[in-house]
Amino acid sequence: MNRFPVQQKGASAFGNIVMLAILVFAVYVAIQYVPQLMESKAIDSILQTIDSTRRTTPISSAQAAEARLISLLQVNEMNDMTDSYTVKERNGRITIVFSYDRELNLIFKKQPMHYEKSVILN
């Protein structure tokens, strides 16, 4: 009786190791990037809150805008961001700018990530 060789059913060990390595790398990058994304979205939310609440309670000066910004940072437990913003008042317009840098370690190189967000009040 002649038997035909059995065809392989599934991936090889080498293929499984390569797929596992790719998955581990993706998880490694995601563990670093997701908190940065969440931080960025929280700052967007803070700036949007300041912009929307100024319609009901107007902000009269840069100091008042900064006080409101600091209180929102404290509510969101983002006290480390207090040195990452500037509040300027020019020609009756108040501008709040967040500018900060983070780093994404890709094992083979460190990728700098720059975030900058702003809102103009009045």
Image (cartoon, rainbow, N blue to C red):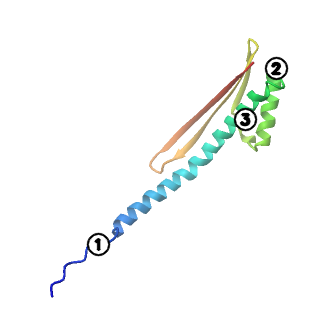
3D distance between C-alphas at marks 1 and 2: 73 Å
Q: Which mark is residue 8?
A: 1
- Give the crowd class for mark 3: few <14, some 14-19, many >=20 residues within 10 Å: some
Task: Describe the element under mark 2 as helix, strand or loop.
Answer: loop
Q: Earlier in the sequence, mark 1 or mark 2?
A: 1
Q: Earlier in the sequence, mark 1 or mark 3?
A: 1
Q: Which mark is residue 46?
A: 3
| Residue at point 79%, 34% (across, down) | 70
Is residue 70 rendered to the left or right of residue 29? right
Task: Describe the element under mark 1 as helix, strand or loop.
Answer: loop
Q: Which mark is residue 61?
A: 2
Q: How many marks?
A: 3
Q: Answer with the quarter of the image where residue 103 lies.
A: top right
- Give the crowd class for mark 1: few <14, some 14-19, many >=20 residues within 10 Å: few
3D distance between C-alphas at marks 1 and 3: 56 Å
Q: Earlier in the sequence, mark 3 or mark 2?
A: 3
- Give the crowd class for mark 2: few <14, some 14-19, many >=20 residues within 10 Å: some
3 and 2 marks in contact (CB < 8 Å): no
Residue located farthest toward the bottom when viewing the structure as drawn: 1
